[in-house]
Image (cartoon, helix red, strand yellow):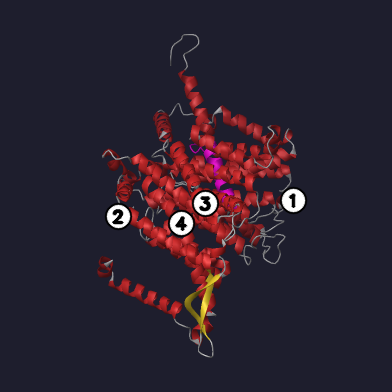
Amino acid sequence: MAVAARTRSTLAATGRAAADPGIEAPWFARIPTGVWLVGAVLLTMPAYANNFVLFQVFGWSFILGIIALSLMFLAGYGGMVSLIQMTVAGLAGYMVAILGPSGTEQISLGLSWWIYLPVALAVATLFGTLVGTLAVRTEGIYTIMITLAIASAFFYFTRQNYTIFNGYNGFTLVRPPDLFGVDWRQPVPFYYLSLACAALCYAAVVYVARAPFGLALQGIRDNARRMAALGYNVTAHRILAYGFASVLAAVGGVLLVWQNGQIAPGTAGIPAVIDILVIAVVGGLRRPIGPFIGALIYVVLSSFAPDILTAFGLEPDRFKLIVGLGFLAAVFFSPDGVLGLWDRWQARRARRPDPLTGKVP
Amino acid sequence: MTGFVQRRPIATLAIAVVVAFFAWLVLAPWPPAVTEVMGPKRVFLSAILSGVTLGALYFLVASGFTLIFGLMRNVNLAHGSLYLLGGYIGFEVADRTGSWLLAFPIVFVITALIGIVLQYVVFRRMEGEELRQTLVTIGLSIVLADLMLAIWGGRSYQILTPDFLSGPMELPLVTAVRPNGDFVYLRYPRVRIWILAAAIVLGIAMWLVINRTRIGMLIRAGVDDREMLAASGLPVQAVFVAVFAFGAGLAGIAGIVGGTFQSLSPGEDTRFLLASLVVVIVGGMGSITGAALGALIVGLTEQIGLTYAPTYSVVFTFLLMAAVLAFRPQGLMGRRL
């Protein structure tokens, strides 16, 4: 509801600005200061962060953030909580490993990057769209159950199939291509690569959310019947949303296999599928920045959980317990995730009486 | 039943032919031509029986799941965790007291109590917020899985079959004919046959309770229209708690059964959660008959697939689910959404 209200107010604001052509500022001036600051910090990060932080913490956060962003797009704008996104990413990663070069030479075809990259993205997108076509026949919790069932089927299938997916072992030594003479698996190039992809995906989601398609999708989320009565094809919009989200997830999957250097059934296993949901929900499903915040929290927790746990006198391998409890707390106390907490804090600050006049705004 | 025959005469005929052919395959000794195509009859029969007994286990897990869903509209994604927890507790009880039967009431009571706590602490607070309930149960299943890993470790456990159920038994099913004209009968683990019988008895009892008693009437009324039932001044919350406790207890008991004829290890919780999901999607939400039918079909598909095409057995289950979704989204026995 709040998103709808906000969208409406932005719409009203832009409408007013458009009515008065002299006032409208250029697009770059309308970007808030916070975005410039975060952008500047992220761009200059290699100057003051070590390789572990660049590659493991930020690289991984961007990748998980992209995959969770695809879930956020479906859930936040489309009202469809799909657990298939990690599987789509996994399939894209598998395609890269199968079509491109890898350590498993009897299966990998070793094609060059300009063939396997588009094919991997296309196959994963097609798969995600097909699953979406099935999933949109259902609503609400049914969607969760069906996508979870398909995701598990994919996991068990990759684990059992040795002719294409190389079963339990998966693929190792999957390396990104040496484009422009750069080894993209080095921390700094990979950092910028994942940052660029994350920024592109983020921008794409922000753009699509305000484009006619995104607005129609949000309308369908709020009241599918009314939108159908207005002449919108509800099913087509939903399937298209799955298609778009699949592209994002596929990009994340390709980056994921390059970062890990390997892919195995566990990459898209059920815990990984649930992790993506946890990340998106903890970050917040209302705005596209949420998944990235959630991913950063998740990665920092998982990287430093052993140290934190030993500091509290617990066993270091109880990391999942912390994640689960954190997730429970988030769902119990702030259903909108960290972003919801931030919004509430802002709202409370806005309601506070002015310190000079004592007036309540 | 007669209504279906009158409405769909051709479909009825097709189903009858398939059933008759199936019955012939199971009962008659196979002529050599059939053996050439399908392999020995013994393999086929054990695949069928494994499928049916696995279906019985799936039914135990999924019937609680589908009842809870049908009545309260909440998807308890921690149902698989209750199954695994029941199995582990059953293993401890059976191991310490040496009595396999004693494990059943103890596990039923413990998991039912957990179910009551879940209903009071989680679901009652978020009535009507389906997505949030689902998310909370996902979080619970993560926490429970990790706690169980901390207590019981990553190794796999098997509950010992009690003496009176161990060993094979001979079934009146002919697998082959000896040259001297004697029939060779199928030998099959006794425990599985007994579990199948118990599941059938339980299924019929549940059907009777739901369709023939006052409590069952309350539950059916709740499935149809919860608000109206509450407005009529009936104790809806008590029914909810009872059904939740019963469903959770069934999942715990299924854990003992699963631990006896399969094994218990981390990851089994998600496996059985997935199985329940597929069973209720195929069978139809909230229907006991649907759960039975779905469990039977899913169990058979899995085991026949495992016997004749091991690599693709998971895909068969998945294809089955996709086909049901594509042609009958509400499930075989479900009502139109």
- In the rendered image, residue B56 lying in the magenta stretch gets the answer no
Give whichever of discs 4 and 2 has the lower sequence position: 4
Residue B160 circle label: none
The residue under the point 45% across, 55% down is B62
Amino acid tagged 4? Leu
Discs 4/2, front: 2
Could you say where residue A331 lies in the image, as x and y percent from the top left? 50, 36
Discs 1/4, front: 4
Tell me the distance, in whole angstroms, between the alpha carbons under discs 2 and 1: 77 Å
Q: Quadrant of residue A315?
A: top right
Mark 2 lies on residue: B212
Residue at the limit of the structure toward the top, as seen here:
A357
Q: Secondary structure at mark 1?
A: helix
The residue under the point 68% across, 54% down is A262
Could you say where residue B135 lies in the image, as x and y percent from the top left? 49, 42
Do badges 3 and 2 share one subunit?
A: yes
Q: Secondary structure at mark 3?
A: helix
Image side of residue A130 versus residue A176, left or right: left
Q: Quadrant of the N terminus of chain A?
A: top left
Could you say where residue B249 lies in the image, as x and y percent from the top left? 47, 49
Mark 4 lies on residue: B60
Residue at the limit of the structure toward the bottom, as seen here:
B180
Mark 1 lies on residue: A181
Residue B83 circle label: 3
Amino acid tagged 1? Gly
Do badges 2 and 1 share one subunit?
A: no
Tell me the distance, in whole angstroms, between the alpha carbons under discs 3 and 2: 28 Å
Against A306, is A84 above or below? below
Prevalent SS, magenta region: helix
